Amino acid sequence: MAGLPRRIIKETQRLMAEPVSGITAVPDEHNSRYFHVVVAGPSQSPYEGGLFKLELFLPEEYPMSAPKVRFMTKIYHPNIDKLGRICLDILKDKWSPALQIRTVLLSIQALLSAPNPDDPLDNNVADHWKTNEKSAIEQARQWTQQYAKASINNH
Amino acid sequence: MSGEVSRQMSHVSEGSAMGSDGNSSEDLDEDDYYMDNYDDLDLDCPSKADDPEYFEYEPLQVIDAERMLNEEIETLCTTLKVNPSTAKMLLFGHNWNKEEIIDNYQRDPQGFLIESNLASRRKPDRLVGAKPVCSVCCREVNPDRFLSVACGHMFCRECWDMHFQTQIQDGITTGIECMAKECSILVPEDFVYEILTQPKLRDKYSKFSFNDLIKSHPRLRFCPGIDCAVIIKAKECKAKKVECEACGAVYCFKCGLNYHAPTDCAVVKKWLTKCEDDSETANYISAHTKDCPRCHVCIEKNGGCNHMQCPSCKCDFCWMCLGDWNNHGSEYYECSRYKENPNIAHESMHVQAREALKKYLFYYGRWENHARSLQLEEITRENIQTRTQKKVMNNEGTWIDWQYLFHAVALLKKCRYTLQYTYPYAYYMDKGSRKELFEYQQSQLESEVENLSWKVERAEIVDRGELENQMDIAEKRRQTLLKDFLEV
């Protein structure tokens, strides 16, 4: 891990030593700035029972700039688009160098528990959520069954 | 220097340059015109007080603007006894409203600074141990390397430096905040300058923060002209016309878009966005050529005037409505007013949508048509210039003798420009007596603009007195409309 900032080394060590419940984050064996992440769908959410793969990358400027995070598993959520990009304030203008990989992943887990259709990334999904929440949640549950179980097994 | 004065100055300089620069004739307006010719007739020439377009402004160079900002900052420093960085942040954050800042500060200095994100009730972090760990870089650092802004969140100098570098690269300067999470305390410039090491970034910081200050100042605006370095200083922030002396750009002081009286900033923006979205359809529907209503020969419009004369059958008709021009004098009203289908509320969605498109195309067509006419009238101006030059060479009068023709084109363009911007205004107006009055005045103006355009295109065969009379009428109509509908 030569040349890797102390901050990243420390964070990685702590993620391994004291993992957050429901989240695993493992650095790539060839690139210590690239993390393979799996987030378990929170209980009492339509994502319950699913395991969602994400990728997390720490840019050169980290921690002055936010990490880049993206869902790899298909997910039906108003703040996550088809490409898996996430609409989350702390990943953009509310980023602070005092935040960490751990806090980012916790925020993403919280976003799964509390979708925010008023600040949508995918307009179609958000409209669905606003006009017929029940049916939207059912759709999210269905996608969880369909994609969030298979993807872990397949990859 | 006011707008009036600057115009008169350009008048003088034009006189001495004598025809070397055709453009300056456009700067002339009817005020000079009346003053030059009708002093003895005691016509009611519009004074500053009742000219609805009157606006006081002056162009500044960057260095003058810098001096002006610094003076405002210094005044606040001495009144409040705060340092220049704080004063700058307060002015930036409170719309440069000195009275309000002084009032609020004197009532509760600490509370006001907290509200402005420049102070905090938080106790500063206590550094523990001989080599405390910086929470951003996780390195052990000597205690004397730790620094904080008003909130007391301690980070090491290297991390602050990196933070500033990243923020400045993203174009953030006056808005740089503390690094702690959910902390909105602002970083004043003296703190940034103390830490920032790279000279290149120090320059960038100073340049970007100057831009921020100008943009936040309600009485200053960067000239939107391409590559123009002028900053316009106005007495008040109003949606009035600014003409840049340096680059010639004409725009609204408040929003920076093309000048748009009588329409206001929000409406013109809505209109332009709508035109951008819909104009493909509109372009398709409004063709550049039309058939003569009598003999059906295809006619291309090659001048600005909407009074058309068919080259083959010689019938006179209106380009907009294709009606007989001779009936237009009294019934022009019918041409500029869109007739709504009275039963619209009972029609199906489909019909309503069609009707909405029809209404939009009606206004868009007229808007677009006047814009095109303006371009064609620029060609008319160039033609007049060539012809005048020839005449002067042949000793048919002097350059000064023919100046009235340029005044006429300049006035025509000014009137048509206002006319063009009456269409978005009318489009968004609610039905009712005010709209009726507006459309009545609009039709009056339109009618006189077309008369003037017709006469200008045939200027050499039209009597000068007749032309000048027409100019007077057209400008009066324009002024009347603006007086009633332009918000002062």
Image: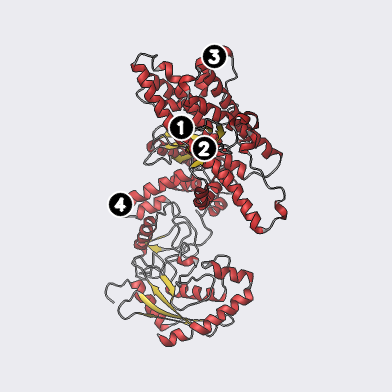
Residue B17 position by quadrant: top left
Q: Is residue A90 depicted above or below B10 in this figure?
A: below
Who comes first in sequence, dot 3 or dot 4?
3
Same chain for the residues under marks 2 and 1 in the image? yes
- Please tell me how crowded label 1 is: few (under 14), some (14-19), or many (20+) other residues with Cα within 10 Å: many
Residue positioned 37% across, 47% down in the render: B207
Who comes first in sequence, dot 1 or dot 3?
3
Instruction: State the residue position of label 2.
Output: B370
- Give the secondary structure at mark 2: helix
- Give the spatial CA distance, label 3 vs label 4: 60 Å
Residue positioned 45% across, 66% down in the render: B126
Query: What label does residue B200 carry, if any?
Result: 4
Q: Amino acid at mark 2?
A: His
Q: Amino acid at mark 4?
A: Lys
- Give the secondary structure at mark 3: helix
Q: Which of B357/B300 is in front? A: B300
Instruction: State the residue position of label 3.
Output: B39
Residue positioned 45% across, 20% down in the render: B460
- Give the spatial CA distance, label 4 vs label 1: 49 Å
Instruction: State the residue position of label 1.
Output: B377
Q: Chain of mark 1?
A: B
Q: Residue furthest left?
A: A2
